[in-house]
Amino acid sequence: MMQQEEAMAEDRERTWSESGPAGQEEAVLDVSMLQSRFGEKDELLAAVASEYKNYVRRAGQELKEALENGDEKRMRQQAHTFKGNAALVGAKRAESLAKSVEQTAGQQDWQRAREMVCALEDAAEESVRMLEELLQSRGCESRS
Amino acid sequence: MSEQKGSVLFIDDDEMSRNIIGSYLRERGYEVHLASHGEQGLEIFARERPDVVLLDLRMPGMDGLQVLERLVESSRNTAVLVVSGAGEMKDVIQAMRHGAWNYVIKSLENLSLLDEAVIRALNEQQLILDRERYQKELQEALSENEFYRMKLESIFQSLPDGLISVDNEMRVMEYNQAMQELCPKGGEFELGAFFTEIGQDNGEYCLSILRRTLRDQKPVYNKRVECPAEHPSKRVFLVTATPMRDREGAVTGATLITRDISRQEELEEKLQEKREFRNIVGKSPHMQKIFNLIQQLSNVDTTVLITGESGTGKEVVVDALHYSGHRSKGPLYKVNCAALSEELLDSELFGHVRGAFTGAYQNKTGRVEVAQGGTLFLDEIGEISHRIQLKLLRFLETKEFERVGSSQIKRADVRIVSATNLDLQQKVQDGGFREDLYYRLKVMNVHIPPLRERKEDIPLLVDHFCKEYSRKFDKKITGVSDDVMRLFMKYPWQGNVRELKHILEHGSLFCPGGKISREHLPGEILEVSRSGPVARVSAAPHEELTQERIERAIKEAGGNKSKAADVLGIHRKTLYRKMHRLGMDL
């Protein structure tokens, strides 16, 4: 039974990693899902946006440092966390790119890694911007 | 904020995840505790005891699996849900194997799933708690049940009465120690075995009662059973059987209770013996003295003179004397001396030879001779002639006698018991009875008091005669009504026990069953009760019977000689003899 579950889990992961080549086709932000999950909870959404914004700035910096230091392990860990947090706010493209960074981290292809990190930073910034726009459209101010 | 649903501890090293998921859950109504690493999580858990723990697996230091193991160790009912990032499925499965209840992949879409997973965990936890509580309550109820069962078992086993229960098929379901000991087949009792098989040869009595109870579905109360099995002494039980029913009232078996009343019956018999001695009934001190005296006299050959008014039961005393002594194997002959003329009495007692007198066509053996080795009872001894007195005296002194018309001396070993209702001493003084014979006859004197002097014996006598007539008339006569008993206690009983016996015979004949009441009694006793005691013709039994007294008695008795004899306090035959002597028409 458990072996069957493991096999199914691996299939699911494979499907997940194969979806979207480097996040180019992914939406920047899943606005409809955000609205579905947070509904009228503007305060909560503002808090989430603020958390995410701070995180993106902090994590982008840490990723670049790991890249410059050639620290693959750290880069993989950071990308993994980035992937999870992006998923948590519906930043689909950033999530996808973070996953690609995580996978690229062990391949010694620093050029490709640098490009991916830059793309991830852009996608994340774009998702932050869209989040702020969403908040503004709902009459809320984003927290710094 | 909605109503608080429960408390949640979220352990995750990533600050953003902690804050976002924490805020989301708070917004959903949970009390949320946050921990940034495993050690902190365990500390908060120990302090706050949250309902649900959300656990990230990949953490620096103590990782999620280690935390999970510690949580499961500390409380097996802790609901731990794994909250992981995508791509951690192997770790998630590992966690599920180590006791995690569920998992949720961190994502915006799955926030609602997280809420649902927490709710489900809380519900399951509640179910577990409920189940544990019910199990505890059930355990307590079972323990209590066991306690009462043990208590009942203890009572069941300690009862002195034997108990056995069977199902509808007569299979033994339960029995106690007393039953095992009381029943001769007790040693063979076995749970589940058929009672029929156990008691085939000896247990039919209990068996038939149980069968009847099951068949009629009605209890059988206090059935007296004399155990047919061989015992050193008689074993008597009171057996009660009741059907057992289920909640719907259907009979599922029967229970039999046996109470050993052997000792009780033995004591009752002894008590009865004290109140009744060889058919002589009485608990009065005088009668108790007579019982003792009879016992003392039964095994000695001394002559006994029984005195007492007519109807007091002198003949019954003779029976007791004879049958309780060593002469009981020999014959007992009774002769009413007043009923025979001198010649006939002589011949009756001592016999005669052929030709001894007119009509003596052949030899006749006298009572003295045929009573060899036994007892000869001479009733109304005060009525015998001087000549017979002399012959009797000689026999008493020498044990020798001659048949009428014969000179051949014969010997006989016979115990003489005599009786009279006359004042024999007075008769001696008047010269009507030989003094030497008087003292020969009266070596021991048993005087029976009249019934009016021992009225406390009346209820016992009533009970005794009612039983006798119940048997005789095949009726269930249970006694007399209170009213009749009051009447009996006031009545003078001139005719003594004989009169009481006749009245009860009359009452038993007319009573259809149950208690004899006034309407069943003869008219005379009712008349006496209405008008007060009638002055009997024979106020003193030893008073001389004159023609005038006899005529008056016959008139009072409406011409009935037997009743007249009762009124006079004499035997019917004595009345006829007196009338004959006085030349009255018979």
Image (tube, rainbow, N blue to C red):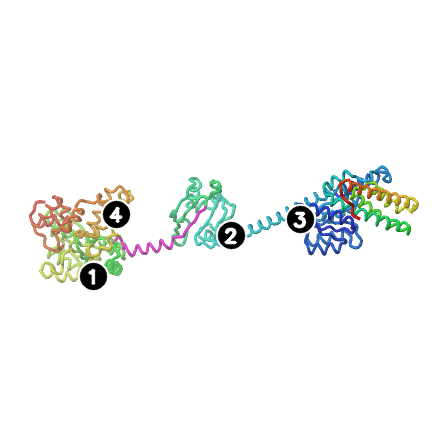
Q: Quadrant of residue B414?
A: bottom left
Chain letter of mark 2 equals B
Q: Few, some or many C-alpha atoms within 10 Å of disc 2 (few <14, some 14-19, many ≥20)?
A: few
Q: Secondary structure at mark 4?
A: loop
**Mark seen at residue B318:** none
Q: Which residues are magenta?
A: B255-280
Q: Position of residue B517 (x, y in %)?
A: 24, 45
- Is disc 3 in contact with disc 4, using a CB cutoff of under 8 Å? no
Q: Sequence order check: which comes first, mark 1 or mark 3? A: 3
Distance, label 4 to label 1, CA atoms, is 40 Å
Labels 2 and 1: the sequence-earlier one:
2
User: Amino acid type of disc 3?
Assistant: Gly
Viewer-closest of B172 and B369: B172
Q: How far is mark 1 from mark 3, CA to CA?
A: 110 Å
Q: Are marks 2 and 1 on the same chain?
A: yes
Q: Which residue is mark 3?
A: B6
Task: Name the disc covering residue B148, or none.
Answer: 2
Contact between marks 4 and 1 (CB within 8 A): the answer is: no
Residue B272 painted magenta: yes
Residue B348, image x, y percentages: 16, 51
Q: Are marks 2 and 3 in contact (CB under 8 Å)?
A: no
User: What amino acid is labelled 4 in the image?
Assistant: Ser
- Chain that bears disc 1: B
Residue type, mark 2 in image: Tyr
Q: From mark 2 to mark 3, how far is it between C-alphas?
A: 41 Å
Q: Which tag, 4 or 1, sits closer to the chain's start?
A: 1
Residue type, numbered disc 1? Met
Q: Mark on residue B444?
A: 1
